[in-house]
Amino acid sequence: MNPPQEQATLTGASTGTAPTLKIFVGGRWLDSSAKTTGEVRNPADHSLLARVPMGGADDVDRAVKAALAAYPAWRATPPVNRVRPMFKYRELLEKHFDDVARIITKEHGKTLDESRSSVRRAVDNVELACGIPSLMQGMGLEDIATGIDSQYFRQPLGVFAAITPFNFPAMVPMWFLPHAIACGNTFIVKPSERVPLSQQRMFELLHEAGFPEGVVNLVHGSKDAVDAILDHPGIAGVSFVGSSPVAHYIYKRAAEKGKRVQALGGAKNFVLVMPDADLTRAAQISTESCFGCAGERCLANSVVLAVGEAYDTIKTKLIEEAKRIRVGDGLEAGVTMGPVITAAHREKVLGYIEKGIAEGATLALDGRAFKHPKHPEGYFLGPSIFTEVKPEMVIAREEIFGPVLCVMKAGSFDEAVEIVKRHELGNASSIFTSSGKYAREYRYRVEPSMLGVNIGVAAPMAFFPFGGAKGSFFGDLKAHGRDAIEFYTDKKVTITRWF
Ligand code: NAD
């Protein structure tokens, strides 16, 4: 167990001063060598929570050296022993579950229930990694020729790093870290500079769980820190989640340096609604899918594509449902939608709404004027719905990542499928129908690789692979599930004959 005085200084936030965060390297909380800091603000009231060091090559190099130093002993630790601190970490996450959820809501803005769900998904991944002695096993075959046997073992590769987005601050790093270290690798997390506080807390818990020093490391910053990770010769592979242009850049630059890369990108997810669907349920579920987490979700179904006569009915029902959303501070009871992440992002979303009006879509529900009575400085927006949207409009093509739903009409199932297929992104999609034939046909023909049938947020559980297709994913092996074991290990094949 590590001494309590080595905990990160998050407490400053509650005493009215904004602490400057530390990095966690080699089992210690250290000052970053960054020359500048960024601000971490609560999106609900604009209050300053912390300053985050905008670290670069020096911090990354210190983390890589610590991770490389820890690797030989960690790799040689039997898997059954490697997962002991993982079980302890799971216990600590359960014990501090609400504490972590509150930090997420404060730094990100989503509701406490949404934060709790994401911590649950993080725990699911830790639980999966606890099974590594079974999951990591290889295979063998006797007598590949007479008297000759062959088998393969899975071996870790060294130091891996994860670069993660703002929208799921506690969960997304846990898509990677537990599996990577359980396989015997050592690890570095570079969270989004906009929401570094939940990882700070999760690393306090990792520390307390008793992982040997250097096995897990945390650095902060933005592009400079990312580039240093991509270029560092001591790093064997990189897991990335974020927007598509950055995902593509990460994929190219890290691969050029000979690293393994998995880069999950952005999304524009369509929900196809057939006339034979339960339209009341389809409207309820699609509203939650689009406006949950204020639309800042890579699995948000942000375009409802209604086929034929489903259009008029679903349009009315979606507006009715969206009017029931209660916007406010995610910590307030009864609130169902929090603010967006920053003032700048709010402006960007407003810009998309202006664009939609200019393009000729109908703004059937206008959320622009929402102001919180107690927090006028918060980055709030009410839900907005555009109808009469056409596939070529910017609001139908680009990821808005805010509480804006586009409703579009397709003349037939085939036309709807073509609209989905023409889009360059392919993260997730859903179909609402009571016909098995249409559901099967949809799954067969469209590319988005996380698919819901009468489900609004088709989020694969920890034991299934998570990741999209087309411009939403760069790489081969996806996040978590068995893909994680493949990504974080190499297969060593031996062929043996004894004379
Ligand atoms: P982002 O791409 O701006 O940032 C992601 C990470 O990359 C951050 O750690 C950031 O510091 C770093 N970064 C940003 N710009 C960079 C640059 N120019 N060079 C190098 N590094 C850079 O993404 P975001 O705004 O934090 O997150 C939202 C995006 O993430 C959305 O597009 C969303 O769809 C996507 N996302 C995808 C998934 C998925 O599973 N596919 C999951 C969650 C979020």
Image (spheres, rainbow, N blue to C red):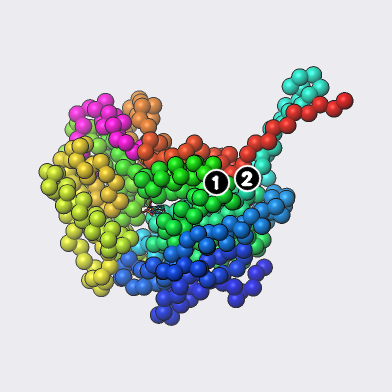
Quadrant in which the N terminus is drawn: bottom right
Q: Is residue 414 above or below residue 316?
A: above
Mark sitting on residue 157 = 2
Mark 2 surroundings within 10 Å by alpha-carbon count, few (fewer than 14), some (14 through 19), many (20 or more): many
Q: Position of residue 43 (x, y in %)?
A: 32, 66
Per the model, the C-alpha gap separating discs 2 and 1 is 8 Å
Is residue 171 at all visible to an observer of this figure? Answer: no
Residue type of the residue flagged with mark 1: Gly
* The quadrant where residue 13 appears: bottom left
Q: Is residue 101 above or below residue 359?
A: below
Mark 1 surroundings within 10 Å by alpha-carbon count, few (fewer than 14), some (14 through 19), many (20 or more): many
Q: How many marks?
A: 2
Q: Is residue 447 above or below residue 241?
A: above
For residue 384, side relative to residue 241 (left or right)? left
Element type where label 2 sits in the image:
loop
Mark sitting on residue 237 = 1
- Tell me the residue at 25%/70% (across/down): 377
Q: Position of residue 314 (x, y in %)?
A: 21, 41
- Tell me the residue at 33%/27% (across/down): 438
For residue 337, side relative to residue 182 (left or right)? left
User: Assess mark 1: CB under 8 A from ligand 1?
Assistant: no
Residue type of the residue flagged with mark 2: Leu
Element type where label 1 sits in the image:
strand
- Tell me the residue at 17%/47% (across/down): 356
- Tell me the residue at 29%/35% (across/down): 423
Considering depth in this image, is 20 or 305 the residue closer to the camera? Answer: 20
Q: Position of residue 2 (x, y in %)?
A: 65, 69
The span shown in magenta is 406-426
Marks 1 and 2: in contact by CB < 8 Å? yes
